[in-house]
Image (tube, grey):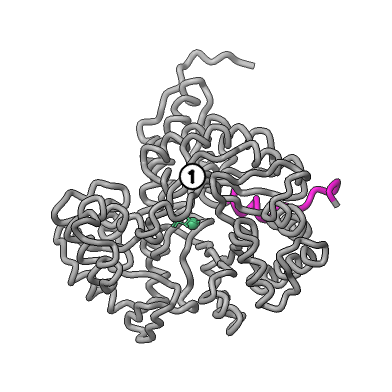
């Protein structure tokens, strides 16, 4: 063993190398609200098949009417001047005009959601300084949706888009029932979502009953067996790679004695089916739906939630794996510590209200300091196809900055960092941690 007397130095190009490596490493985007063209699209483009209730959203008008921007435009043109109903009565392109005028033309678009539109347009090859809404509309109308998906994924550096397939959404469910091959597009990975089962059992029970499962609101063993059959049917139909729910801040799991309907369904139906099928469960915790219902989807809020429930779930259900993201900044540290205690817990993403550069940086830095590279730093939550361009461009920059700082500290301490190390770490963070987590084999002692 030799003792080095040469001080380790930071290679001058380290930051650039890390940025370039992150930029060229394909992302598996593990949570979006995007759909493949087979789910229909309201904007026909050159394919000429508009489906007004289609689920694939893309194009400049959808980008401008993203619910993050709807919330922001009402701060600038308040509802006492321009009532909510007047906004909702407008056509999509009129709403987009309104947002464009007030947030982009008459103000500086510095918010993260506004900057996102600019980044997206620039990376798609436009000069955003031209501020030419009509020109953007024309260009999108000329695109073929299917080819456009390829192009956008390439520009965004995303190799796999994970959908959110909400079985309680009539529009979506009917598309699955009408054509089971609706999800055969290999670019899009299905995920089964069923919030009402856990958050609103009465509604879920009435639905399951209508769909020919012999379910009553009373949670008898027969009823729970039928919920399991329902889940089995839909996991089979969708070929979901994991299942997911969004939960309110009040979500509480207190153990086997917890008797709320949602807890019983979760404990006795959802988790056993997923354990049996060896599929992870994603919990997205902290959303308060409809804080201002007049803003519709833009009107959801958030509060701090209870991380001890996550820890108890991980303890009580060792045969289940949990992907967890939380909406409150205040929950992030506790979630990281839970991640250190439970290997069946994978913290993921900077969700929604923490998906801003300052908070992404803080959270990513903290996660890396506490979990090394064993977490999933980001998901896009994109609702409009082209949003993956900005969401990943902005996040990759931040992840690269954090990684560079950590490498610099290691180099200063005498640990060399090679290009292969950077490539391996980038892959872990942008795709492998997720693909490894969903494909983990069951531990033999749990059989
Ligand atoms: O529950 C969810 O999956 C949330 O991400 C959405 O409901 C939310 O509207 C959203 O788009 C956040 O980014
Ligand atoms: Zn989401």
Q: In percent of the image, x 35 and y 31: which residue is there?
A: 12
Q: Position of residue 192 (x, y in %)?
A: 61, 64
Residue identifier under label 1:
327
Q: Position of residue 154 (x, y in %)?
A: 41, 63
Viewport quadrant of the N terminus: top right
Which residue: 78% across, 52% down? 442
Q: Is residue 362 visible?
A: yes
Residue 434's x, y, as percent? 59, 51
The foreground one among 432 and 262 is 262
Left or right: residue 353 versus residue 90 is: right
The part of the image, by quadrant, that contains residue 341 is top right
Is residue 9 located in the magenta-colored stretch of the structure?
Answer: no
Indicate whether 337 appears above or below 437.
above
Q: How many marks?
A: 1
Res. 230 image quadrant = bottom right
Residue at horizontal 71 percent and vertical 41 percent from the top: 254
Q: Which residues are magenta?
A: 432-446
């Amino acid at each position: 063993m030799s003792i080095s007397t040469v001080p380790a130095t930071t290679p001058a190009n380290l930051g650039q190398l890390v940025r370039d490596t992150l930029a060229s490493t394909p992302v598996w985007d593990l949570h979006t609200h995007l759909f493949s063209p087979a789910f229909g699209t309201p904007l026909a483009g050159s394919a000429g098949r508009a489906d007004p209730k289609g689920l694939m959203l893309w194009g400049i008008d959808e980008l401008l009417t993203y619910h993050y921007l709807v919330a922001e435009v009402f701060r600038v043109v308040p509802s006492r001047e321009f009532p909510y109903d007047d906004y909702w009565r407008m056509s999509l392109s009129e709403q987009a005009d309104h947002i464009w005028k007030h947030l982009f033309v008459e103000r500086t678009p510095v918010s993260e959601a506004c900057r996102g539109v600019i980044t997206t347009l620039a990376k798609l090859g436009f000069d955003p300084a031209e501020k030419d809404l009509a020109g953007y509309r024309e260009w999108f109308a000329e695109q073929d949706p299917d080819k456009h998906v390829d192009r956008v994924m390439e520009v965004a550096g995303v190799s796999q888009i994970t959908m959110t397939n909400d079985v309680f959404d009539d529009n979506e469910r009917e598309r699955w029932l009408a054509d089971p091959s609706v999800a055969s597009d290999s670019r899009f990975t299905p995920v089964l979502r069923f919030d009402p089962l856990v958050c609103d059992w009465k509604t879920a029970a009435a639905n399951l009953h209508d769909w020919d499962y012999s379910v009553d609101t009373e949670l008898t063993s027969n009823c729970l067996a039928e919920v399991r059959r329902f889940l089995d049917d839909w996991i089979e139909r969708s070929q979901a790679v994991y299942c997911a729910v969004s939960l309110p801040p009040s979500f509480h799991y207190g153990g086997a004695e917890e008797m709320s309907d949602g807890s019983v369904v979760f404990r006795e139906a959802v988790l056993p089916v997923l354990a049996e099928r060896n599929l992870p469960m994603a919990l997205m915790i902290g959303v308060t739906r409809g804080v201002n219902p007049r803003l519709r989807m833009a009107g959801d809020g958030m509060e701090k939630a209870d991380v001890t429930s996550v820890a108890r779930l991980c303890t009580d259900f060792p045969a289940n794996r949990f992907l967890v993201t939380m909406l409150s900044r205040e929950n992030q540290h506790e979630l990281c510590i839970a991640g250190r205690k439970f290997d069946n817990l994978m913290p993921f993403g900077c969700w929604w209200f923490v998906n801003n550069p300052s908070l992404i940086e803080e959270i990513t830095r903290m996660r890396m300091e506490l979990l090394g590279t064993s977490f999933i730093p980001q998901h896009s939550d994109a609702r409009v196809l082209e949003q993956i361009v900005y969401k990943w461009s902005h996040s990759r920059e931040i992840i690269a900055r954090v990684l560079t700082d950590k490498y610099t500290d290691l180099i200063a301490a005498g640990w060399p960092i090679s290009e292969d190390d950077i490539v391996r770490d980038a892959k872990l963070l942008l795709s492998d941690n997720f693909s490894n987590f969903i494909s983990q084999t069951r531990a033999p002692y749990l059989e």
